[in-house]
Amino acid sequence: MKFSVFSPLLIMLGIGAGFAISLSNDPHTLPSALIDQPLPEFDLPPIRTEDVGFSRADLEGQVALVNVFASWCVACRIEHPTLMRLSREKRIPVYGVDWKDKREDGAAWLLAFGDPYELVGEDQNSKLAIELGVTGAPETYVIDKTGRIRYKQIGPITEDVWNDTIEPLVIALEKEVTP
């Protein structure tokens, strides 16, 4: 086979096109196979003995956030002020899943920093986290009125993330009429 003068140019164009496509992808956005799928069934025990646990049934009929956090999670401290504001303003119900944590550590963390959650469940053995495909804390799921996962936020919910991404989705989901 004869080597063409244009072969190196074609190879370089192919490599350049590959780089251009990969640079246009947002490295912080990971696709989730669970988008538009029902939230898995779960029933988590509470992290405080005086509280009730948290189950899928608690989310029925409302748009809500399910936030996976842990006392050992440094990035959870970044998003915590935003979650506290949402809780104070009663903007959207926020539910917590304390992941890979001892109950007493999660409870102490909420006592120290404030508790923005309607209910908090303990997932020390990662059963729910595995079903959700959690890769690290914090991760937050936007759940619609029918119990379907509509968005997955990987990393902290900052004010910008709330304003630019999550709040517009929440507003649209709140307007949806459920059958």
Image: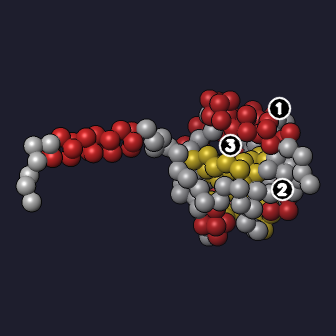
Amino acid at dot 3: Ala
Amino acid at dot 1: Glu
Quarter containing the N terminus: bottom left
Residue contact between numbered discs 1 and 2, judged by CB atoms under 8 Å: no
**Where's residue 31, x and y in %?**
55, 53
Residue at 80 percent across and 63 percent down: it is: 55
Q: Which mark is residue 146?
A: 2
The answer to whether residue 29 is left or right of residue 12 is right
- Secondary structure beneath disc 2? loop
Instruction: Tell me which label, 1 or 3, sits earlier in the chain.
Output: 1
How packed mark 3 is, by other alpha carbons closer than 10 Å (few <14, some 14-19, many 20 or more), is: few
Q: Nearer the viewer, residue 130 or 102?
A: 130
Q: Residue furthest right?
A: 179
How packed mark 2 is, by other alpha carbons closer than 10 Å (few <14, some 14-19, many 20 or more), is: some
Point out the frontmost of discs 1 and 3: 1
Point out the frontmost of discs 3 and 2: 2
Q: Which residue is mark 3?
A: 112
In 3D space, how far apart are the residues under numbered discs 1 and 2 (Cα atoms)? 24 Å
Residue 141 in the image: above or below residue 169: below
Looking at the image, how many numbered discs can be counted on the residues?
Answer: 3
Amino acid at dot 2: Thr
**Where's residue 175, x and y in %?**
86, 39
In 3D space, how far apart are the residues under numbered discs 1 and 3 (Cα atoms)? 20 Å
